[in-house]
Amino acid sequence: MPQKLPHSSGRVLRWLGVASLPCLLAAGFAVSGGWLSPHRVTQNTLIAALQGVDGKHPGFRRNHAKGVCVTGWFEGNGTASALSTSSFLEARRVPVIGRFALAGGMPYQGDAPGKVRSLGLSLRGADGQEWRMGINDIPVFPVRTPEEFQALQLAVRPNPATGKPDPAQVQAFRAAHPWLASAGAALAKRPITSGFENDTYRSLDSFLLQDAKGHVTAVRYAMVPEETDVTIPALSGENALFERLANAIAAHPLRWTLVFTVAGPGDVIDDPSREWSGQDRQIEGGILTIDRIESEETGSCTGITYDPLILPPGVSASGDPVLQARSAAYMRSFAERSREPRPVPAVTPATLETKSQDKAS
Amino acid sequence: MSRPDVFSGPSRLLHWLMVVLILTMLFVGVFMASGAGPHYHMLVSFHRPLGIAILLLAIVRLINRRFNPPPALPADLPRVMSLVAKASHWALYVLMITLPLVGWAMLSAGGYPIPLWGQSLLLPPILPHDATVWGWLRLTHTVLAFGLFGLIMAHAGAALFHFLIRGDRVMQSMTGMPSDPAE
């Protein structure tokens, strides 16, 4: 038996050798996949944080869950072609598939006027190029990074006992992020319009425009409504804002001007929580016209994720980390909701049908 | 009529080039598919052309295999092992081809533009826009990627098994080491 020992220990070593390479690969894979870094902010942790606030609603977008599809067109005016080679900014018309929504993960929330409203847009070029936008009616983003976004969601998570955020948690978040105080103040004093139809939607994140010589200009952009003074009577009810939008579109096509704001010397480009100076140069890029509204049940916006990093040549992302996290989390949300049974949205074809009949009668 | 006991030069070049590309692809893939970090978009933009390169190289490899057949497995290899070896090699080929195709198809069904290089060069969609199809293909892409990774682990382990346990020359047929120092 003693003679056999070296032989058998050699055999064990050789089997360890066989296992070494697969184990090394597995370890590398686990590191890359983030399984060994549980505190990393990932697509799943961001979505879980959102669901911690608003609950799980299968089949709906994980954020901006309540919405309605619209279609129309965008017509560039050529002015912004001085800054970008994008064909969308030339004087030509492209079709648009859009979506108006309320921020938050609750698909059946009531339309309170103070809720954040958003507009998703897909500008569709004839050559297969697209420019997608996900823009909001707030002056700045409340946070600077995905990590802060997740921390904020965890801080405003409703306390199971009261159903409301714990003020101490919110206060602790504010105290730990004093640099977000100016964003909080800007958000608190933002003007609130009477509806989706006369609201201004802003990119919040910055983008880079490239001209034909490769010169790069950092911009933010906004869709500014043509009519700010809308004379539609106020509606009430759970879907008041959406019904009002349907009425406005039924009355006549709605128009917004795409306005670029060029970063000035003091403006922080990669931080969406920081306002830019009011002195910046502005350039009108074209007109967005929305002439049709449809429920998500039948509309074509449902199969589109408004990923802000789907950009045409001539436009690219700034270094803003929130843009990257939005692109990643939207992909995850889009994949998950698309596998879930298709739910009935709050705004159904019947909701919109009733409104147009009301108008006719 | 005995076949050489090492893979041909082109076969070895293709194999080792694809080792680098596929491992890079899998590691980048598993990192970006969970992550939300500052390099997300750059990695996704790198993942697409790399996948197409692997698809094309896999096809080149299948053609090359017709002209440069692999050396025979050792005659004394148990029949079950020989069957598993052959089946796993074909499974590797199938995954090298289907994974990029599923990736391309899922982005098509998701209604995503599919830039191949920079922003200007777009791949045409290979499926109509259908979000449900996108959702399931996106999951299939992940499952197949884990399957490919598992096969690669088994493949690497099997090569070392031949070298360290059986002491045959199967691993050297791909590393290209001379079959006998005395030769």
Image (spheres, coloured by chain):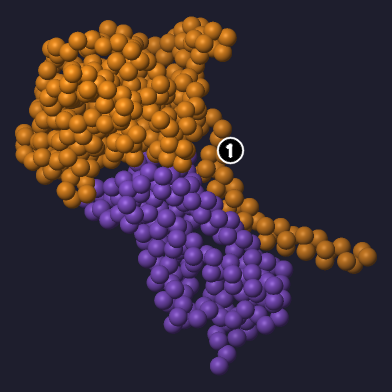
Chain colours: A orange, B purple
Q: Position of residue A189 (x, y in %)?
A: 27, 7
User: Residue at left 40%, top 38%?
Assistant: A334
| Residue visible at 26% across and 11% down in the picture | A235
Instruction: Name the amino acid, label 1.
Output: Leu
Vertical relation: B26 (above or below) A44? below
Identify the residue position indicated by label 1 in the image: A36
Q: Position of residue A27 (x, y in %)?
A: 59, 47
Dividing the picture into quadrants, the one containing residue B41 is top left
* Left or right of residue A50, residue A185 in this image: left
Tell me: B97 left or right of A94.
right
- Percent of width and height locating residue A56: 49, 27
Question: Which sits in the foreground, A114 or A28?
Answer: A114
- The residue lying furthest to the bottom in this view is B1
Residue found 59% across the figure and 50% down from its top: A26
The quadrant in which the C terminus of chain B is found is bottom right
Quadrant in which residue B37 is drawn: top left
